[in-house]
Image (cartoon, rainbow, N blue to C red):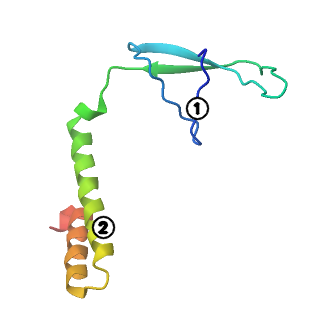
Amino acid sequence: PVKPLNLAKDGRASLVAKLKPGSYYLHIRCRDKRSGEFSSTLHHLFFVDSYNPDNDPSLSESTRELNEIDYIMQQIRKNKDNLYELKRWTAELQKRRFPEQR
C-alpha cells in the first residue's frame, strides 16, 4: 500500500478496501525514519473468499454458547461470597461444559 499500515502486536492489519474473492499479494517494505532508507520488499500471498462466518449456523451456535458461559462465569465471580448462588451458577456451568451429563 502507498499509505503506511498500523500493525497490531500480533502482526494483523485491517484493510479498508473491499476485495473480490481471489488471491492477492501484499507487498511490504519498511522505512527507517532516521535515514529514510527502505528495506527490501517482502511479498505475502493472501486469499479472499466469499465465506461469511456470521452466516454459518454452527459458528453462530458456538458464539451463543460461549456468550452464555461468559455470563455464567461473571455470575460466579459476582457471587463468590454467596454460597447458595455460587453453587447454583457452578452447577449451571457444569451443565454447559458437559452436556452429555444432563
Can you identify the residue that label 2 sits on? 74
Q: Distance of mark 1 from mark 2, alpha carbons? A: 33 Å
Is 99 placed above or below 51 here? Answer: below
Q: Residue furthest front?
A: 34
Identify residue for label 1: 6
Circle number at residue 71: none
Question: Who's the residue at 27% across and 47% down the image?
Answer: 63
Whether 6 is drawn above or below 29: the answer is below
Q: How far from the left and from the top, in percent, is residue 84? A: 20, 85
Residue found 27% across the figure and 78% down from its top: 79
Residue 78 x/y as whole percent:
30, 74
* Relative horizontal placement of residue 9, taking residue 17 as reference (left or right): right
Q: Residue at x 26, y 54 (%)?
A: 67
- Residue at 59% x, 42% y: name it: 9
The quadrant the N terminus occupies is top right
Q: Amino acid at mark 2?
A: Gln
Residue contact at pointers 1 and 2, CB within 8 angstroms: no
Percent x, y of residue 3: 59, 19
Q: Please tell me which of labels 1 and 2 falls first in the chain.
A: 1
Q: Residues within 10 Å of mark 2 (few under 14, many from 20)?
A: few
Q: Nearer the viewer, mark 1 or mark 2?
A: 1
How many marks on residues? 2
**44 vs 69: above or below:** above
Q: Amino acid at mark 1?
A: Asn
- Residue situated in front as seen by the camera: 24 or 13: 13
**Residue closest to the eye, 82 or 26:** 82
* Towards the viewer: 34 or 30: 34
Query: Tag 1's secondary structure?
Result: loop
